[in-house]
Amino acid sequence: MTVSTKEIVQHVGALLDLAGVLVIAVGVVVAAVTFVHRALRTRDPVTYYPPFRQGVGRAILLGLEFLVAGDIIRTVAVSPTFHSVGVLALIVAVRTFLSFSLEVELEGRWPWQARARRGTSAGGG
């Protein structure tokens, strides 16, 4: 029984898609369980809501990376037609927009902006 390169690439892409979905699902469950545990222990859910959102956002960001990788592998290696590459470009653009939006939501800054330094004065000296 021979397996073609195309079939191997399809399977690799499907595995990356599965990994992306699992990362998102497990990340959301872990964030939710952590949130509920902390909220019930302290009776203060408002305090733990921002970390919950950050946990969910990070899980989605990481899962999107796997999903984009699966799309790229399948499109480039299996069917590199102009139409499939155009569809891939659209998918990557949408997912990149989602990633940037989540990054801004989580970090409060654009990904290319420097992180604020702690413990330094604004006067520089």
Image (cartoon, rainbow, N blue to C red):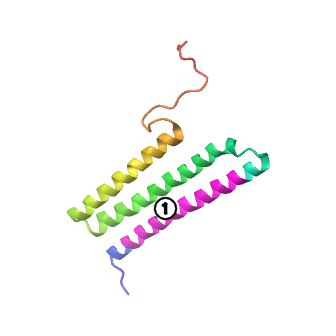
Side of 21 relative to 7 (left or right):
right
In the figure, residue 64 lies in which quadrant? bottom left
Image x and y of residue 100, in percent: 43, 44
Q: Quadrant of the C terminus?
A: top right
Side of 55 relative to 40 (left or right):
left
At 49% across and 51% down in the image, what residue appears? 61
Per the rendered image, the range of residues in magenta is 9-36
Secondary structure mostly seen in magenta is helix
Residue 73 highlighted magenta (yes or no): no
Pointer 1: residues within 10 angstroms few (<14), some, or many (20+)? many
Image x and y of residue 87, in percent: 28, 60
Q: Label 1, on which residue?
A: 20
Image x and y of residue 35, in percent: 68, 51
Image x and y of residue 37, in percent: 74, 53
Residue occupying the far left of the picture = 82
Q: As rendered, which of 67 and 101 lies closer to the eye?
A: 101
At 74% across and 44% down in the image, what residue appears? 44
At 64% across and 57% down in the image, what residue appears? 30
Residue occupying the far bottom of the picture = 1
At 51% across and 32% down in the image, what residue appears? 115
In the figure, residue 65 lies in which quadrant? bottom left
Q: Quadrant of the N terminus?
A: bottom left
Q: As rendered, which of 52 and 4 lies closer to the eye?
A: 52
Element on which disc 1 rests:
helix
